Structure formats: structure tokens, C-alpha cells
């Protein structure tokens, strides 16, 4: 069927993802091809030393993104979106959105980026004998309790961003299992929150005499393919104030950006992995068996269908690169050259490949914010060099790219070297891989492994969310891994690039200097 007919007949599927700098919507046809897109640019704010987005920011952004999608459909096909086969909502994982019985937000949304939860994460990790990261929802909740924040007594619902948006659109207090695994650990047998840990937490806070227990306030856990409600009249109006979109559309379980990345890269089967590189970065490897012990730098979360996966999450990735490219753009404009930003990125990425394998001794710490994997609660972006280093544009840009994935390497060395985790395929996606081959070569050198990138890599999370929404109505009882293999990707594994021995050796030399010199970054945080 033609795209126009797909849309008019209500057979298109919509995926929406609220990322850290952009909200994106992708409409797909019955062959999983994107047929229209919409987007909205936004940015988090640092208020009272906490990173946040306001509810007004959220809904203005969602509505503007959907309006952009409508305009794209209108321009391409001359029709309105009135019906859809299904919808899925995704967003940045973790964080803290606490509501009272009236549905009022009790304190401003605290995003994954906040690192004020150190004491809570440490105590819970010890209590559970399981690594609980700073950004997880349970860390935020317990830190609020430790800090005696008065709002905690009034909590009726604790949600992540995607669970919140889904709740407003459907009235259902549910979330996908992958998203839930970033709130509280999941029992892979029951596909629910770990009952033993829930009991330990409730016992821990019992002296506070709150009116709620943990399961009272957390969203219900659903796995991919389960019905998560339908778009209500109120939800349709919130999403599309023009009134064209009709209520009653099935909605799949909302998911975090980790889960949509897995779906978008066909990485939900054991021994597959993916790496997402954008504003933040994370790698996911679906495990065949449990790790030998808990590691502070490795999170255990789940795929959208509930399989355990090892996650290395880094707060920083491309933001510092973006800042430097903007400086170069301003420099060109000062000389009267109108620079196309996309072409400038491509040019500088390609120039990096002419640099030395070890960046000529240059190092970059891209820490816009703190980086828990390397023990930094706060960050200062730094370029570090000595007088004798080979300071060239090629080495500078290569160091920028190495710096963007350096922390990923540190975390993944534990999995691939120490734990001997087996992985058959690692797929990259996100803006870091937009310039052909360059990001693959850099990440391959970092991980010492071939890296695949699919043609759909640029579609990212919203496309992955649309696939999960399609699975809700088209899965026909097939497992999610089989559905992705046989229907969505049909054996297409993308373009694979293997790193050279020289690049691997160069990156290893770079990372050893990087780890030795972390004291420079710590001093910058302390004194600047």
C-alpha cells in the first residue's frame, strides 16, 4: 500500500520519544518504513542545583513535535492523521516524578542527569547486594527520604517521564519492563519488581510510617506485546489540540530509551549488543548468564521482553563535540564563510581519521556533568596536552571522538575482558554514527570489536518505539526476537566495520593515559 493510503486507512503506527535535547516522532507504514517525522528541540534547566524540565516544557514539546509530524504528513501526502493502528511513547529512563492523589506534581521533575543521590545509591546497593546507580528512581526516592523532604509523605504515584506521559494519554499507571528495570531491579523469573528487594525497602522505611508501600506507588510492569490501554479523549486532545486525532487507539507499554535502542538495532536476543551515542551514551549487551558479581559501573536492566542485559551508562558523549563544532562555525562566519553545520560535522569527523592512532598525546574529558563510572560527581570539559604533543586539527578531533566513548570503554572492559561476556554482534546508533564509518571505527577501536550500523541508525529511539507499538498489534504470539529477525529486519544486519590493530593499540594507549590523568579532571572540578 502507498503511504498515503496507509495513513488514511489508519494502519500507520506512531512512535514518540522524549530525548534529552529533542522530542521526535516517527510514523511508520506496514513494512516498518518511516513515512513521516516530527521533532521539537528542548533543553533541560539547572534549577536549585537539580536538572529538570517543567511540565509546561514537556507538553509544549510533545504538542509541537506532533504538530510538526502533522505538517510533514500534510506536506507529503495532503491528508490528516485521524486514526492509527497503535502508538508508543518512550523517553529518557530513570529520574523522579512524584505525584499526589490529585495528580499534582509534588516537586520539579528530577532527571537522570542528577548526581545528588550518592548516599542513597550506596546504601541501597549494600542492602540489595545489587548495583543501584545514582540516577535510578529508587535512589531518588530514598535520597528524598534521607533528606527528610516533606513531600514524600504525600506520594501517590512515582513515575518516569515516559510512564508519566503514557498515564496522561491513557489513564493507565503502567510502564514497560525495560523502563521499570531502571526504577527498581526486576526478577527475570516473575517479570516484575524483585519482591525480596521491595520487602527490604519497605522494612527500611517502616519507621517513617508513610501511608504507602513501594508497590502502591510504582507503575505496573508490562512486557512488550501486552496492551497498555488506549488513547483517551483527553489524551487525544493533549497530543493533538487540532482535534483530528481520534481516541481509542491501542497503546503499547511505554519504554525507556534503552529499550527503544535495543528494538531499533535488533539487539534483544542474548549475545547481541548495541551502543547508543548521543547527548549521553550507553551500551547494552544481552546476557546469556549472570555476571560473577555486582559492579558499581554496570547496571543490570532488561530488554523490552524481560531478558537481563548489562548496561554501561555514561552521562556525557557528544555535547562537548557539539560545542567545539559551534566554535569552528563561528570562526568561519567571522571570516565571512556561511558554514552548513551538518557538512561541518562531517568534514571534521573525516579529518579526525588523518590523526595519529593515539591522538598524538592529546586527551579530552567531555564531562559537561558528572560521570559515575569514573567517580566524578560533577564535571568540567577539558582538553589536556603537553608541550611536546602533536597538536593538530586531526589529532584534536580524533581526541574529541575518543573522549566521547572513553568512559564506555572503561565500563565495557569489565564485561568483555574480565567477565568474558560473549557477544556476536554490536550495533551502533545515534548522532555519533551519522558520518559514515568514522564513529564505527572509533567505537570499534575502543571496544576491540567489529561495529555494525544499519541504514535506520539515524531513526533511533522513536523508530524503535514505533516497532514496539507495531509488535503490539502485529506480533501474533511471536517472540519479540523472532518478530524483529523475521519481519522487521529480515536478516539485515547493516554494514560492519572491523577496527585495525593499529587503531586498537592507539586507543588502548590513549585510555591508559586517560585513566592516569583523571586526577586533572578531579582537580578542575574541585577548583573551578
Image: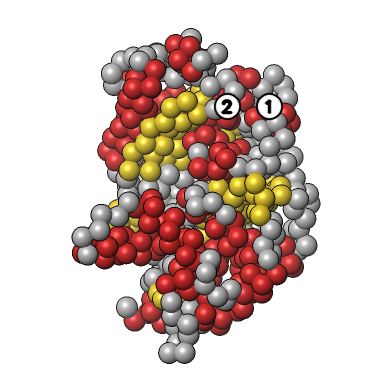
246 vs 227, left or right, is left
Local SS, label 1: helix
Taking 426 as reference, is 350 above or below it? below
Pointer 2 or 1: first along the chain:
2
Name the spot of residue 54 as percent of width and height, x first.
30, 43
Q: Quadrant of the C terminus?
A: bottom left
Can residue 453 be seen by looking at this rendering?
yes
Residue furthest toward the top?
Answer: 9
477 vs 175, left or right, is right
In front here: 488 or 304?
488
Name the spot of residue 28 as percent of width and height, x first.
51, 25
Q: How crowded is mark 2: few (under 14 residues within 10 Å), some or many (20 or more)?
A: some
Q: Quadrant of the N terminus?
A: top right
**Residue 487 badge:** 1
**Circles 2, 1 touching at the beta carbon (< 8 Å):** yes
Taking 370 as reference, is 207 above or below it? above
Q: Kindly identify which residue carries mark 2.
A: 32
Amino acid at each position: 500500500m502507498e503511504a498515503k493510503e496507509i495513513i488514511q486507512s489508519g494502519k500507520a503506527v506512531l512512535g514518540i520519544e522524549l530525548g534529552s535535547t529533542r522530542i521526535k516522532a516517527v510514523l511508520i507504514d506496514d513494512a516498518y518504513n518511516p513515512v513521516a517525522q516530527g521533532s521539537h528541540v528542548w533543553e533541560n534547566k539547572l534549577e536549585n542545583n537539580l536538572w529538570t524540565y517543567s511540565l509546561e516544557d514537556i507538553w509544549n514539546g510533545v504538542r509541537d513535535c506532533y504538530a510538526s509530524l502533522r505538517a510533514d504528513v500534510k506536506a507529503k501526502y495532503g491528508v490528516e492523521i485521524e486514526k492509527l493502528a497503535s502508538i508508543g511513547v518512550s523517553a529518557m529512563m530513570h529520574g523522579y516524578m512524584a505525584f499526589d492523589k490529585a495528580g499534582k506534581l509534588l516537586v520539579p521533575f528530577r532527571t537522570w542527569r542528577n548526581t545528588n543521590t550518592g548516599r542513597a545509591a550506596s546504601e541501597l546497593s549494600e542492602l540489595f547486594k545489587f548495583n543501584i546507580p545514582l540516577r535510578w528512581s529508587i535512589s531518588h526516592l530514598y535520597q528524598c527520604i534521607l533528606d527528610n523532604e516533606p513531600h514524600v509523605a504525600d506520594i501517590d504515584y512515582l513515575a518516569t517521564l515516559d510512564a508519566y506521559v503514557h498515564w496522561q494519554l491513557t489513564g493507565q499507571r503502567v510502564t514497560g519492563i525495560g523502563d521499570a528495570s531502571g526504577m527498581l531491579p526486576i526478577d527475570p523469573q516473575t517479570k516484575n519488581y524483585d519482591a525480596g528487594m521491595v520487602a527490604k525497602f519497605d522494612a527500611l522505611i517502616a519507621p517513617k510510617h508513610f501511608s504507602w508501600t513501594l508497590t502502591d506507588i510504582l507503575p505496573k510492569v508490562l512486557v512488550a506485546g501486552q496492551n497498555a490501554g488506549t488513547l483517551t479523549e483527553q489524551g487525544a486532545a493533549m497530543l493533538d489540540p487540532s482535534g483530528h486525532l481520534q481516541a481509542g487507539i491501542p497503546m503499547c507499554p511505554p519504554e525507556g530509551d534503552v529499550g527503544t535502542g535495543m528494538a531499533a538495532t535488533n539487539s534483544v536476543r542474548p549475545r547481541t549488543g548495541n551502543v547508543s551515542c548521543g547527548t549521553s551514551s550507553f551500551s547494552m549487551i544481552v546476557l546469556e548468564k549472570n555476571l560473577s558479581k555486582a559492579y558499581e559501573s554496570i547496571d543490570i536492566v532488561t530488554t523490552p521482553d524481560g531478558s537481563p542485559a548489562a548496561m554501561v551508562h555514561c552521562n556525557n558523549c557528544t555535547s562537548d563535540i557539539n560545542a567545539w563544532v559551534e566554535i569552528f562555525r563561528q570562526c568561519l562566519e567571522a571570516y565571512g564563510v556561511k558554514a552548513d553545520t551538518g557538512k561541518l560535522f562531517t568534514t571534521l569527523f573525516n579529518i579526525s581519521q588523518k590523526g595519529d592512532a593515539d591522538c598524538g598525546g592529546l586527551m579530552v574529558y567531555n564531562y559537561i556533568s558528572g560521570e559515575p563510572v569514573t567517580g566524578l560527581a560533577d564535571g568540567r570539559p577539558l582538553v589536556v596536552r603537553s608541550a611536546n604533543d602533536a597538536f593538530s586539527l586531526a589529532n584534536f578531533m580524533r581526541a574529541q571522538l575518543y573522549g566521547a566513548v572513553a568512559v564506555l570503554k572503561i565500563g565495557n572492559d569489565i564485561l568483555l575482558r574480565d567477565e568474558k561476556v560473549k557477544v556476536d554482534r554490536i550495533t551502533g546508533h545515534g548522532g555519533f554514527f551519522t558520518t559514515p564509518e568514522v564513529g564505527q571505527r572509533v567505537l570499534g577501536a575502543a571496544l576491540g570489536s567489529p561495529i555494525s550500523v544499519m541504514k535506520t541508525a539515524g531513526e533511533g529511539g522513536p523508530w524503535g518505539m514505533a516497532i514496539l507499538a507495531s509488535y503490539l498489534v502485529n506480533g501474533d504470539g511471536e517472540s519479540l526476537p523472532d518478530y524483529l529477525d523475521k519481519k522487521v529486519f529480515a536478516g539485515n544486519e547493516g554494514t560492519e566495520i572491523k577496527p585495525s590493530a593499529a587503531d586498537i593499540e592507539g586507543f588502548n594507549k590513549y585510555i591508559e593515559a586517560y585513566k592516569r590523568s583523571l586526577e586533572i579532571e578531579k582537580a578542575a572540578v574541585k577548583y573551578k
